[in-house]
Structures are given as C-alpha cells and as structure tokens.
Image (cartoon, coloured by chain):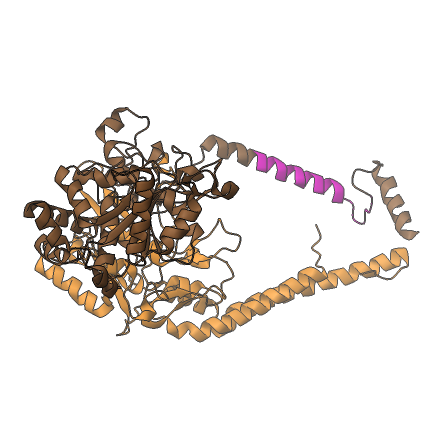
Chain colours: A orange, B brown
C-alpha cells in the first residue's frame, strides 16, 4: 500500500491544524474564567424546591407551559392508556416541556416523593462552556438563556449538561433548543418571579436570591434535623454549585439528581484543554507530525513521478 | 335613560308597590333575590350586594320595566323556562317584577284585540320599553314564511324593535337563527343582530337560556339604564364568560380518565364524564355548570346524564353532529399519571445486534476484498469488472495504453 496525499487532503490537514491553533489560543484566553468552585454573585437568583412540601398538583407545569407558550405533549411513550390526545402527559423533560413534576415510588412499600425538574442554572454551566457560538449564556441574575440567532444546532449543550436539561426539537424543520430560562423574557425582566414559583400553592418551590435561599434551606434543616436526606442542600456544591436548590426526604439519586463532584464541569473541561494547548504544544506537535508526513509523501511522490516520466516520456499530469 | 323611565312612571309602579298590591310574601321575594344573586354574582350592580335583603331593598325601588315580547320562528321553550321555576310563587313573581305588556303565549286576547294591544303598547312606551324577541326571522322569499297579522316578521321586527329602548334576543334562534337556520335552512332564518347590526342588542343564546340571565339584564336596564358588559358575540359576560368544562361537576372524572362509553353503561350510571359521548362542554361558554335550572341542583343537561350540545355557541349547536367528540383546548393532566424518575428506553435484543454486526462485517469484508482485487496492480486504469487478462499481459497492455 502506498500512502498518497492529494490536494484535498492537504487543504483539509492545513485547516485542521489552523483550527486547532486558533482554538488553543481562544481556550487559553478564557481559562481563567472557570474556577473549580465558582463564587455565587450576590444578585444571582434561584429556586428552592422542597419535596416534603410538594403535593404534586402540577400547577407549575401548567403555568410554565402557558407562560412559555409550549404545546401539550399528549403522547406518553411509556403509557399508551393515557396517550389519548386529551392530556398533557410528558414522560420527561422534552422539547414541549421545560418543567416537570416526577414521582419516585419505593419498589416495595408506600413511600413516595415528588421531584420538580427544570434547568438547574449552574453557576458555571457546562452548556455555556460547551456552546461554540455563545448561543447559550449566563445572563443577568445568573439565568442561563438561549439565543436562537446564534445557535447552529450542534447540540453540544444537550450532550454536555450533566442534568440532561437542554432538549432539541427533533420534530421541527427549524429546530430550537428548549430549556427553562427562569421565564427570563416573559417575567423576570418585567420584575416578576418565574411562573412556576408564582403559582405554587404550597410554596414547595420558592424564588429568591440564591444566597437567601441557601440560608433558608439551612434553617429548615436546622429546624428539623434528620428530616432531610443527609441534612444537606443539593445544588450548594454540586458541579460547582447550581442556582436551583433541592431539599429532599429521600436520596437525591433516587429522585434523579445525579451524584456529581463539587468541581465545576467548565473548570474540568478547560483544565484538560489547557494542558493540551499549553504553550501551543498540542497544535505544534500535531502540525509537526502532519508536516513530516506530508514531506515524506511528497518526496516519494516526486520519485514516482520521475520514474513514470522515464517510462512514458510524458510529464506528470497532477 | 333613568330619567326617561321616571317620566313614564306615572302609568307604572315600582316593584315594591306591585308586590304589596298583589300580596306576594316577603319570603318569596327574598328567595327570588337570592336566586338573582346566584345567577349574576358580581357583574350586575343590582346584585352586587352582601345580602338578599340589600338586593330586595334596591330592587323594590325599581320601576317595573315595560316589556314587549315578540314570537317569531320559535318553539316557545324560552317562555316556558321563564314560567317554570320549581316554585309556583316564583313564576308569578317574575311576571310581577316586569310589566309584560304584550306576550302572545300569555295574553288572554286574540285577533284584532291583540293587535290593538301591541300597537297601543308600542305607542305608549315608545322609546322606553324593552323589546324581547324569541325565535328567528325568515328572510327568504321576502320573509313570507312567518306572518303576524298578515305582515312578514321582518316588518314587525323593524316596527316594534325600532322603537325599543333596548333589544334582547332570547334563545339561540333569536341570537343567530338557531334550529330554523340549521341545514337545509328552508326559510333563510337569521337572528335579530343580523337584521339590525347597528343597534345595541343583547344576545342570550341557549336552548333555552337561564331565565335569571334575562331578568338580570332587564332589571339592570330598568334600574340604571345600562346594559351589562358584552362579549364579542353580544352575550352578557356575567352569564357567558365561563367554559362549561372548566366548572363541570363531572370534571374530576375527566381528569381521572373515567368516561361513559355507551348510554346506560356502568359509567353512565355512576355519573362519569360524558366527553366521549360527544359532550361539547370543552368548547361551550355558558353558566350552566354553575347555575342550574329550575332552582334545583343538577337540573341541567350534563347533570341528568345528557352530553352538552353547545347550544350557546353559534359554531356548534345545530351545526356539529350531536355525538361528535370535540377537540380539547384546555390543559389537563390525569391524576396518577406522573412521569417516572427514569424513563425506560427501548432496547435491542442481542440476537438482532449480532445479526446486524454480521451483516455490517460481511459488507466491510466484501468491500475490502473488492478493493484489493481492483487495486492490486498499480496504474491499472481499466474499468472494474472489465475483461480479465493474465497478469503479465495485463501489465504490458496497461503500459501500452498509457503510452499511447
């Protein structure tokens, strides 16, 4: 087998090397923005959800769908009996559901717990770090918002999010990314709290400054020791801290909140890339390897061309 | 407006005076006031009081409004609903609260005598009376399909309603045509508002509508000279702002997915939701689900196990098939259908995976073998699959071809 390189492969190689260099420069420039344990800005807002108070009435789901003008998901993939087209029955967060109440049932026994799932609005979100064009960004008050005019539909955010929150509209010709934005345009900028917290009849989910909510959550734990799982707040440190906080009577992983380290995912990603791109070493090594291969092949090709010319008496056609 | 009533009040008496004269008991009047408060809870100034006594006080001072009631293409059902409250006193009372000057079903006179009564009433209270119209008006063939004393209904309407202070179209027929306008509509039936689009008309659709809605509108007009707030179909909002489905007593069964599948089945006897039997409740705006008929709880279609036919909606009643299921526009979630924490994903069986792997492997192998076969000779420009030659010949031939 001979290893030949043509014009197309050469151009491709050059573009790859150039892109790697540019990417390395860009990443090394923003590496400082992702500390391992980001500090919450004082104006950051958040939600505190307490599943010992939630009654599972799903008023928040209806309010969310109406405020964000989302259609009803009438097909439930796991229960054909209720997929009659009458009810809004999403099985998970999807492109028509930004907020959902889920139910955890103990396999043997009567105990159960609700959980409200929506975007966690991380202090250092993996989706924002992963977004190549800045379509997702940390906006005012720390809300993670999405800009349709910048999105290229790469779905890096969907893959990057540890909570599986951003969803892609697979059924649309011009698909968008759907995720909770704290009702940013609809309510937050009009000095109103998000629809779900405004409508909650039992105050199972409350809205406020993240620091205040954290203090409130700690107070609830102090008032009733042993009531809450591990006597701690989920989201205080997880993945560098999130602006949506949880108090639960059952284990967090049972209600679908994953066990994550305390390091921010943006920090982890930039740590890996900063090693690769330190002093442009990665790009230089790759470019050098490519150069060597091209040089080797080029010589061989020249030798072959001379040989072919000798045989046929015609100059090279390439 | 109020002034104009005072002006003609020489010939009319207040409701209190009338009650006294006819010997209506205070208790019956207070019962009536309570029913009126229930029928129009907050929207009417006259009923927006804390107690029935307060309503009775203000209502008693109202001058009895003169009402001229015209019948066109109708079934008299709307009159019946007004005269058939559960308590005999109340029917009598309703007729004491308003001053019914002309009503073809109720008056004793007939023929020329009745005609004279109509023209006298129109003349006497010209510009001050309330004209209630029941039934649709035929327009095809110059309206000859319904005549009153030899004159087409259209002309009578123009005369009588033209001089009225307020026009109320009672029932679906008078509101937009109702049953007579249903396909094939032989008489070209239309509603009052279709013939007099510029006049202030209150539509009270329903088959029949709740009589207290009519009383509420008439009494508010008599008291303050104003009409209640109307929606885009000229229906008073206080009675027609609610969706039947939103306040239906059977809503819990809808939410739980318990539906009547057939009339007389187990669910029907248990009082389950009638949606699948063609109930038009989700698309119909009326107060029926909160204000039942005849002052008896559950006396209304859905309450007695009959699906709503949407009689207050022009686009539904007598146009959509009665048992056709309507689209749901409201958001509802059935209880006990919570999403699980982990959604089970579909899986592929190991055998299928193995077969697919074998297939893919066979394709890749075949491709590899083919590529070896076609490219084992450098500078071999022949078309793949061309005539096979001996290796030595092939090489020389290829060289020759390139040489040429």
Q: Main secondary structure of the magenta part?
A: helix
Asked which quadrant contains residue A188, the reply is bottom left
Judge whether residue B372 is colored magenta: yes
Left or right: B369 as drawn, with respect to A285 = right
Q: Do we see residue A234 in this rendering? A: no
Residue A309 point in image, percent of width and height = 86, 59
Q: Do we see residue B311 in this rendering? A: yes
Q: Quadrant of the C terminus of chain A?
A: bottom right
Of residues B71 and B278, the one nearer the viewer is B71
Which span of residues is magenta-colored?
Answer: B359-382
Residue A280 point in image, percent of width and height = 51, 72
Residue A288 point in image, percent of width and height = 60, 68
Left or right: B106 as drawn, with respect to A215 = right
Does B47 appear above or below B207? below
**Residue drawn at (49%, 48%), measured in percent from left and top?**
A171
Left or right: A97 as drawn, with respect to B301 = right
Of residues A98 and B25, the one nearer the viewer is B25
């Amino acid at each position: 087998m001979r290893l030949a390189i043509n014009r197309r492969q050469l151009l491709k190689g050059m573009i790859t090397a150039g892109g790697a260099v540019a990417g390395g420069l860009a990443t090394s420039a923003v590496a400082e923005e992702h500390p391992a344990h980001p500090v919450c800005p004082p104006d950051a807002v958040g939600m505190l959800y307490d599943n010992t108070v939630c009654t599972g009435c799903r008023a928040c789901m209806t309010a969310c769908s109406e405020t964000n003008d989302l259609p009803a998901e009438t097909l439930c993939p796991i229960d054909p009996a209720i997929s009659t087209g009458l009810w809004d029955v999403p099985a998970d967060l999807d492109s028509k559901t930004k907020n959902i109440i889920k139910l955890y049932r103990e396999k043997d026994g009567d105990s159960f717990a609700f959980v409200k799932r929506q975007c966690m609005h991380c202090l250092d979100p993996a989706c924002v770090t992963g977004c190549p064009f800045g379509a997702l960004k940390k906006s005012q008050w720390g809300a993670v918002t999405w800009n349709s005019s910048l999105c290229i539909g790469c779905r890096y955010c969907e893959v990057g999010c540890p909570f599986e929150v951003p969803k892609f509209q697979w059924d649309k010709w011009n698909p968008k990314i759907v995720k909770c934005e704290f009702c940013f345009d609809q309510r937050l900028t009009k000095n109103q709290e998000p629809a779900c917290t405004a409508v909650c009849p039992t105050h199972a989910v409350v809205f406020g400054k993240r620091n205040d909510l954290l203090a409130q959550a700690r107070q609830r734990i102090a008032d009733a020791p042993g009531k809450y799982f591990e006597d701690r707040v989920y989201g205080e440190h997880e993945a560098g801290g999130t602006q949506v906080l949880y108090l639960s009577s059952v284990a967090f992983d049972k209600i679908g909140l994953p066990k994550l380290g305390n390091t921010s995912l943006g920090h982890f990603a930039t740590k890996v890339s900063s090693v690769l791109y330190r002093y442009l070493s990665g790009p230089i090594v790759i470019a050098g390897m490519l150069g060597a291969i091209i040089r080797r092949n080029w010589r061989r090709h020249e030798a072959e061309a001379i040989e072919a010319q000798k045989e046929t008496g015609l100059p090279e056609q390439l | 407006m109020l002034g104009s009533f005072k002006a003609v009040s020489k010939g009319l008496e207040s409701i209190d005076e009338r009650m006294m004269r006819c010997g209506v008991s205070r208790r019956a009047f207070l019962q009536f006031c309570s029913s009126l408060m229930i029928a129009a809870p907050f929207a009417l100034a006259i009923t927006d009081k804390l107690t029935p006594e307060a309503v009775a006080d203000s209502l008693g001072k109202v001058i009895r409004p003169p009402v001229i009631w015209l019948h066109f293409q109708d079934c008299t059902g709307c009159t019946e609903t007004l005269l058939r409250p559960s308590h005999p006193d109340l029917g009598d009372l309703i007729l004491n609260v308003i001053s019914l000057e002309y009503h073809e079903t109720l008056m004793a006179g007939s023929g020329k005598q009745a005609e004279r009564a109509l023209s006298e009433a129109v003349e006497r209270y010209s510009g001050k009376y309330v004209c209630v119209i029941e039934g649709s008006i035929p327009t095809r063939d110059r309206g000859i399909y319904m005549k009153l004393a030899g004159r087409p209904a259209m002309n009578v309407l123009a005369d009588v309603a033209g001089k009225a202070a307020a026009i109320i179209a009672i029932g679906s027929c008078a509101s937009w045509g109702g049953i007579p306008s249903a396909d094939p509509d032989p008489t070209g039936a239309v509603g009052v508002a279709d013939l007099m689009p510029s006049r202030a008309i209150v539509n009270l659709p329903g088959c029949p509508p709740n009589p207290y809605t009519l009383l509420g509108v008439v009494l508010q007009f008599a008291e303050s000279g104003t009409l209640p707030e109307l929606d885009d179909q000229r229906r008073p909002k206080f009675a027609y702002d609610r969706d039947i489905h939103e306040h239906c007593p059977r809503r819990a069964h809808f939410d739980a997915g318990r539906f009547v599948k057939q009339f007389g089945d187990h669910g029907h006897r248990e009082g389950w939701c009638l949606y699948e039997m063609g109930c038009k409740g989700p698309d119909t705006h009326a107060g029926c689900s909160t204000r039942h008929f005849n002052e008896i709880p559950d006396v209304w279609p859905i309450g007695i196990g009959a699906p709503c036919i949407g009689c207050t909606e022009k686009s539904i009643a007598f146009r959509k098939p009665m048992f056709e299921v309507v689209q749901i526009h409201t958001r509802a979630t059935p209880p006990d259908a919570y999403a699980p924490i982990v959604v089970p994903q579909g899986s592929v069986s190991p055998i299928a995976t193995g077969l697919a792997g074998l297939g893919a492997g066979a394709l890749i192998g075949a491709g590899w073998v083919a590529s070896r076969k076609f490219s084992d000779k450098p500078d071999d420009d022949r078309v793949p699959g061309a005539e096979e030659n001996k290796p030595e010949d092939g090489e020389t031939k290829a060289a020759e071809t390139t040489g040429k």
